[in-house]
Amino acid sequence: MDRACYEEIAGILHGLLIRLDDRLPGKDITLIAEFIDANELGLALEQLADVLSEDEKPLSPEERANILALVDRMQMDDRVPHALTFCPAR
C-alpha cells in the first residue's frame, strides 16, 4: 500500500472512531487509534468490528457501508463482515 493510500484509509478509520465514539469504550478508542498510528490498519478495523459486535452496538446503514467498503478496499477476509452481523441497524 503506498503512502497516499495508507493516509487516506487511516483518515477514514480515524473518522469512524470519531463517529462511533458514543458506542465505543475510551480504552478501545485509544487502542484502535494506536493500531492506526502503527500502520496496523487491518488490525484496527478488525478490533473496531469486534468491539462493536461484542456489545451488539447499532450501526447506521452509512456506517456499515463505510466499514464494509474498507474491507473491500483492503482486501480483507470475512471476519469484519461476520462481526458486523451482530450489530443491529440504527
Image (cartoon, rainbow, N blue to C red):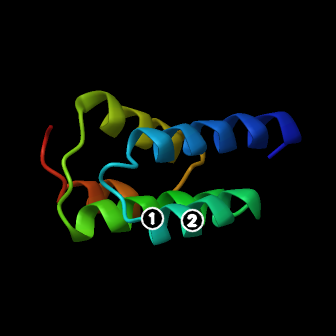
Decide which of 70, 56 is in the foreground and name it.
Answer: 56
> Is 47 displayed left or right of 1 in the figure?
left
Residue holding disc 2: 30
Residue 3 position (above or below residue 57): above
The image shows residue 69 at horizontal and vertical percentages of 46, 36
Residue type highlighted by circle 2: Thr
In the displayed structure, does residue 90 sit left or right of residue 1? left
Crowd around label 1: few <14 · some 14–19 · many ≥20 (10 Å): few
The image shows residue 11 at horizontal and vertical percentages of 66, 37
65 vs 80: above or below: above
Q: Is mark 2 on a helix, strand or loop?
A: helix
Between marks 1 and 2, how big is the CA–CA gap? 6 Å
| Label 1: which secondary element | helix
Residue 52's spot in the image, x, y percent? 30, 60
Residue under label 1, please give it. Answer: 26
Q: How crowded is mark 2: few (under 14 residues within 10 Å), some or many (20 or more)?
A: few
Q: Quadrant of residue 36?
A: bottom right
- Up the image or down, 74 lies above or below 61; here it is below
Q: Do the residues labelled 1 and 2 touch (CB within 8 Å)?
A: yes
Please identify the quarter of the rendering in which residue 20 is found: top left
The image shows residue 60 at horizontal and vertical percentages of: 24, 34
Q: Is residue 77 visible?
A: no
Q: Quadrant of the C terminus?
A: top left
Q: Which residue is drawn at 40% across and 49% down?
A: 21
Position of residue 20 in the picture relative to residue 89 (left or right)? right
Toward the viewer: 70 or 30?
Answer: 30
Amino acid type indicated by mark 1? Gly
Q: Kindly identify the residue that appears in the image at 80 percent across and 46 percent down.
A: 1
Residue reaching furthest top? 62
Pick whichever, 43 or 32, lies toward us.
32
- Residue 59 seen in the figure: yes
